[in-house]
């Protein structure tokens, strides 16, 4: 598969390998650098070093290489999977909250990938050895719909749809406070935090990020909100909600923890503290996912209802603070 990219003014002075890693997140930095060093990447029809600093107007041509990932390094584990759909090309699951998607620092076993390897041996090998089949990710404590690629053909076709923003994603979140506007669009670029590289912040020099939202229900202290991300940045919905001063409930990283109850009546504080302890994770759920099937070419839609932990919180708020 070949792809062309045009460099814009806000992308100047970025290293060639760094730029391509951001543009094609399903390839590791090592793989990107290997493609550059093997003359599979040209800039203005010339071969450049991985450290080449991009300039506005540069035309980048990428001829993607095949990589063997050594999936056998992942030891299969019998992790329960809630499978919504499966055929020879893809697997669609309802990921449970708390499940890490793929191995990484501090999570070398017990991930979704380990469960996938136990369920089926045929997974795409486009990514590195730790991410067979993984086209996109959900945060550890976010539940909901995910699509997994079983073939390289499926992986590349679905990844291209994500890249071209042709995949429709809808999330439901429970957020703090009552929103001033019932509907709107959050257009705020995101950048990795220098102080904490595991978190992100709104920064006009970052990558563009757009989220549409619609408030579905309001309670005295919380709201149920439907989020429709138009881009797919890491932690996008959580950062955008916090940016609007309506952090996702129980999201400690982005100011959504118990500190938000300061000023509440003592009995309300105790009540909500017990609710959040019972919830045990941030209140965000990927409810719907729509994309074109890589083999049939037909649009497929998958929907999963709210898990019981989030539904119980909504029911309680409706009964006591509605």
Image: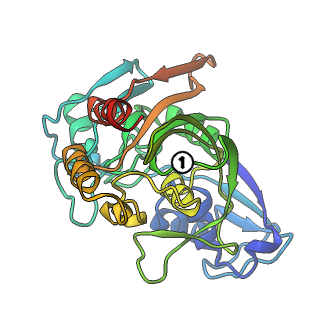
Q: Secondary structure at mark 1?
A: loop
Q: Is residue 55 above or below residue 72?
A: below
The quadrant where residue 229 appears: top right
| Residue 164 seen in the current view | no
**Front residue of this view, candidates 213 and 71:** 213
The quadrant where residue 160 appears: top right
**Front residue of this view, candidates 315 and 107:** 315
Q: Is residue 56 above or below residue 51?
A: above
Residue, far right: 57
Q: Which residue is mark 1?
A: 178
Residue 298 drawn at (x, y percent): 62, 16
Please tell me how crowded label 1 is: few (under 14), some (14-19), or many (20+) other residues with Cα within 10 Å.
some
| Residue 240 seen in the current view | yes
- Colouring mode (rainbow / by chain / secondary structure / one colour): rainbow
Locate residue 126 relative to residue 100 in the image: left or right: right
Residue 210 drawn at (x, y percent): 67, 52
Q: Is residue 208 above or below residue 124?
A: below
**Front residue of this view, candidates 129 and 36:** 129
Residue found at x 66% / y 45%:
230
């Amino acid at each position: 598969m070949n792809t062309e990219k045009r460099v814009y003014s806000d992308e100047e002075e970025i290293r060639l390998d760094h730029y391509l890693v951001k543009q094609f997140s399903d390839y590791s930095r090592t793989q990107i650098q290997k493609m550059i060093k093997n003359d599979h990447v040209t800039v203005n029809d010339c071969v450049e070093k991985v450290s080449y600093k991009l300039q506005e107007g540069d035309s980048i041509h990428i001829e993607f290489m095949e990589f063997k990932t050594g999936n056998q390094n992942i030891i299969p584990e019998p992790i329960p999977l809630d499978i919504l759909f499966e055929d020879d090309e893809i697997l669609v699951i309802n990921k449970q909250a708390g499940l890490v998607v793929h191995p990484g620092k501090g999570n070398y076993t017990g991930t979704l990938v380990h469960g996938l390897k136990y369920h089926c041996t045929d997974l795409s090998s486009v990514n590195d050895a730790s991410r067979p089949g993984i086209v996109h990710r959900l945060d550890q404590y976010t539940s909901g719909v995910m699509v997994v690629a079983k073939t390289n053909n499926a992986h590349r076709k679905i990844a291209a749809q994500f890249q071209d923003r042709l995949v429709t994603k809808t999330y439901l979140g429970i957020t703090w406070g009552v929103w001033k506007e019932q509907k709107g669009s959050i257009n705020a670029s995101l950048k990795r935090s220098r102080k904490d590289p595991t978190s992100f912040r709104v920064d006009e020099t970052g990558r563009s990020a757009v989220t549409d939202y619609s408030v579905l229900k309001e309670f005295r202290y919380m709201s149920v909100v439907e989020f429709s991300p138009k881009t797919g940045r890491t932690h996008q919905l959580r950062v955008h909600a916090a940016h609007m001063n309506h952090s996702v409930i129980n999201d400690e990283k982005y100011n959504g923890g118990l500190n938000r109850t300061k000023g509440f009546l003592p009995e309300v504080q105790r009540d909500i503290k017990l609710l959040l302890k019972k919830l045990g994770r941030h209140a965000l759920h990927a409810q719907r996912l729509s994309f074109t099937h890589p083999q049939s070419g037909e649009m497929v839609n998958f929907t999963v209802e709210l898990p019981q932990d989030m539904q119980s919180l909504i029911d309680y708020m409706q009964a006591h603070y509605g």
